[in-house]
Amino acid sequence: MTTRADAAVAPAVAHLGPRYRWIALTNTTLGVLIVTINMSILLIALPDIFRGIALDPLRPENISYLLWLIMGYLVVTAVLVVTFGRVGDMFGRTRMYTLGFAVFTVFSILLAVTWLKGDAGAIWLISMRVLQGIGGALLLANSTAILTDAFPAHQRGLALGINSIAAIAGSFLGLIIGGVLAPVAWHLVFIVSVPIGVGGTIWAWSKLRETSERHEGRIDWWGNVTFAVGLVAVLMGITYGIQPYGGHVMGWTSPTVLVCLIGGVVVLAVFVAVERRVPHPMFHLSLFGIRSFTAGNIANLLSALGRGGLQFILIIWLQGIWLPRHGYDYESTPLWAGIYMVPLTIGFLVAGPLSGVLSDRHGARWYAAGGMLVAAVSFLLMGFLPVDFPYSLFAILLAVNGLAMGLFSSPNRASIMNSVPARQRGAAAGMTATFQNGATVLSIGIFFSMLILGLASTLPAALFTGLTGQGVPADVAGRIAELPPVSTLFAALLGYNPIETLLGPGVLSQVGPQQAGFLTGRSFFPELISGPFADGLFLALGFAAVCCLVAAIASLFDSAKPSVREAESSGEALGEEDRGDPVDVRSVAVAGRILAPDEAPAAAVLTLVDAHGHEADRAETDDEGRFALSAGGRSGDYLVIATPRGRGAVAPAATRVTVNGSPVHVDVVLRERAAVR
């Protein structure tokens, strides 16, 4: 018999004082914020960056550089967060988190001092972004677990809510920051992370403390290799799938893409088989036996799938169509696109902490499901907007969508982290971050594919008709109309007017100054792509709405009950300062979870016996192995006896606890019966 008690966390946190939890919250929120800001800061800054390294981002041979600058950082964080969460469980979450801040800062400096030009400059930037992503993965993998250790359950939703909303808001704040800094000097886009990284590293090293047990284990090398190879292959397949191939507008039929996708899925299947057999897996598949963990992660993945490509669609919509049609120069559209998306960020910031507080009191299920339902409705309504929309209506829908995502994120994250044993919080946080980051990359591929399909169906004819109508020779117009739609899509994403580049000064001089001015002005290109863009836009937003509806259904399967949750999932015995919880946890003496030898939830009957041998209480575990026992308000020494149900090969277990007015949390890991000879 082996016991694993979250109560081991409590003395360390209590010794550090009540202020420590807020130090942990502010530092980890800063870390998550800077990581997610860097996920999107390049989107707005890419035109200035490519001009700075003397590359044309719209040339077909440079599209791979463009995609990998956007996607490489996301791919590496998606691949490594699970491994780094496991490493944090083994060697210390705070230590790995602080290392992450330092690594992130070093490669931010190397990005800021880029001096190379052309292909070499692009390869340098991509390489440094990938290495910067390693530091980001260390930060993301351990921040959630650090907060879960530091906060009691009745405040955990608020803490994780603020942290998760910072993660979501950071992706939109990056757009504004990139739009402000890049026109001044593109190196500033990377320099801005340096002082924050230096300060965060020093702060984490000097103030954060290890408050969790370290658990001995071995690195699961086979699991790490198969997971990394499989996931990288799938994400590479998605990245190259949206690029043209041969005579096709996209590359989904390319042998390279098919090998990456099919081979990646096969390797991931091998990874699952490996994880079922190794003694110390990196991916704790047993956690999926916990209903709230599984449902929460399904909802989280679908939410990210619906939300991940949203910022790309909004940027294309604003920069390529709406802003030019309303008098903004193409050079200024990146900055204004970020500014016009502020209502979305405000919605996140308002709803996240509020929903965290409310879900702490009333449970996560209805808040998470309601948030996803409202998000689905906002996506559908956004799909019915005209391309040249009135901004007031657009801003309202953005704010509603932000509120809905904020309403979902905090309860969802708290529910997931509250559902797992304390010893596996780092791995659980890494798994959750992997689902979210991987779904974001997948979402970008899906959204781009839908937009390209919409453009490919009607754009060539519209482009040919529009150009020839302004005096462009038919052969030139036909050649331009046959170009891959992805080039037009990237032009809109980057705030470029590609007509001037595609026609060139020779053709423009032939059509006359009036027609040339109209072709290269602010109305021709936006009006030309508005119709084809609307076709793809409706498909993409409809897909996002379906994802959110399914996420709402998955959220309803969260079976955690507030009355038990507050007593047993906090990871510590609640002190006097934590009695603000409306749930009366004082009636609960001992609570926790019963785990099978493989650490999956186990069904058992629990008996609480006092020092005189009298039975004080009896209870059964729920479907996630949780239990709660009452001592009738009496303090003293007790024996907790766990009798497994339906597991003849598993022995009963007993452990002694001391009750002194506060709930005691105990996780019991059952062991196989010894062989009788």
Image: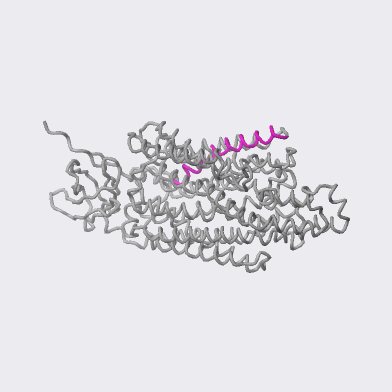
Left/right of residue 229 with respect to residue 579 in the rendered view? right
Image quadrant of residue 661? bottom left
Q: Tell which of 59 and 127 is nearer to you.
A: 59
Image quadrant of residue 382? bottom right
Where does the image place residue 546, in percent across and percent down from the top left? Answer: 49, 60
Q: Tell which of 4 and 260 is nearer to you.
A: 260
**In which quadrant is the C terminus drawn?**
top left
Q: Residue furthest front?
A: 475
User: Tag count in the figure?
Assistant: 0
Where does the image place residue 192, in percent across and percent down from the top left? Answer: 65, 43
Where does the image place residue 267, in percent across and percent down from the top left? Answer: 43, 37
Is residue 129 rendered magenta in the image?
yes
**In which quadrant is the N terminus drawn?**
top left
Is residue 301 rendered magenta in the image?
no
Q: Residue at x 36, y 51 (%)?
A: 419
Q: Is residue 54 above or below residue 415?
A: above
Q: Is residue 467 above or below residue 131?
A: below
Which secondary structure class fits the magenta region best?
A: helix
Left/right of residue 526 with respect to residue 419 in the rendered view? right
State the scheme by which the image is colored.
Answer: one colour
Left/right of residue 425 with respect to residue 114 in the rendered view? left
Q: Is residue 144 visible?
A: yes
Where does the image place residue 423, in percent across and percent down from the top left? Answer: 36, 42
Q: Is residue 138 visible?
A: no
Q: Residue at x 24, y 46 (%)?
A: 657
Q: Residue furthest left?
A: 677
Image quadrant of residue 551? bottom left
Q: Which region of the structure is painted magenta?
A: 118-144
Q: Tell which of 49 and 359 is nearer to you.
A: 49
